[in-house]
Amino acid sequence: MGILDFLKPKKLPPGDPQTQKAGKRIISKNTDVQGRYGAAETLAEIGTDEAIYCLLQRFTTVIGTEIPDEDEKKFVRDRVMRFGKQSIGPVMKFLKEKEHAGMALEILKKLTSPEEHLDCLLELVNGFDPFFSKYPDKKRQTFVVIKEYRDPRIVEALIPFLDDDDDDIRIAVVEALVAQNDEENTREVLLQTILDSEECPRVRIAACDALANLGWKVKGFRKQISAVLPDQFYLDGKGRVLRKRGAGGSGQ
């Protein structure tokens, strides 16, 4: 059995009445603070995959003011963490289905080895729509996390998202590709992104910044790139994209 088979979230069974009741109470604004803490403890005591998944639902809603809300979510996070590897399946299911990814991504990283973590992230990426974002922030956050790793699978998985309809996601992809430092497989991709981003100036600037930071040349594209290069940049005699002195950073 491979890592992904082990991590693949199983279909959660229908909830028993106690799980269902506690699951409703933990996300109810009509339940007082102590009641929600009590519901979290009940779910932690039940300890099934479904109970863990119900605990994670607390991340989907804001209840009360910021500090108490964060305290409740940290309490829930700690209860989920106590189950160790058992929580991976419910966390992955949550990340695939729900919008609020931040704390769930944090949990996933802590519960997995680097190899397992990357496999999980790639599984998430491969499940995203490369053109439309129902939950764009979740997609962007995942791309921010995955750039911590160096693996040829990342380049292959991320390139389709350069056609996403959200500029922030496309910029996150550019940054993740830069982190791979894989000139053979990403140089022309970044150059084509510059050419294709006439209506997305922030994306074009991010791609130019990427090439400038990496020091890669525009060989084979000099004439096309020269014609569309933003004012903040210029090509030197060696065919490298450079940022003009005093020009702002990416997206400016």
Image: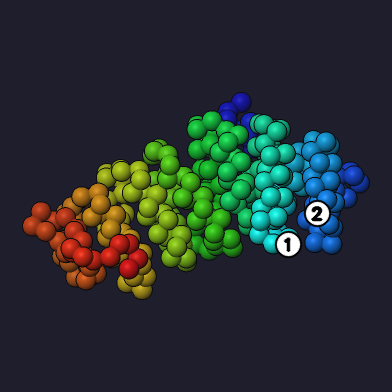
236 vs 156, left or right, is left
Which amino acid type corresponds to the residue marked 2 in the rendered image?
Answer: Val
Q: Residue furthest right?
A: 17
Q: Is residue 197 visible?
A: no
10 vs 101, left or right, is right
Q: Secondary structure at mark 2?
A: helix
Using the image as rendered, state which of residue 229 and residue 51 is in the foreground: 51
Residue 239 place in picture, x, y as percent: 13, 56
- When the figure is inspected, residue 147 is found, relative to residue 250, above or below; the finding is above
Q: Residue furthest left?
A: 237
Residue identified by numbered label 2: 33
Number of numbered callouts drawn: 2
Q: How busy is the neighbourhood of tag 2: few (under 14 within 10 Å), some, or many (20 plus)?
A: some
Q: Secondary structure at mark 1?
A: loop
Which amino acid type corresponds to the residue marked 1 in the rendered image?
Answer: Gly
Q: Is residue 65 visible?
A: yes
Using the image as rendered, state which of residue 238 and residue 24 is in the foreground: 24
Q: Quadrant of residue 230?
A: bottom left
231 vs 18, left or right, is left
82 vs 33, left or right, is left
The residue at 83%/57% (across/down) is 32
Residue 226 place in picture, x, y as percent: 17, 66
The residue at 75%/46% (across/down) is 55
Q: Disc number at residue 64? A: 1
Q: Disc number at residue 52? A: none
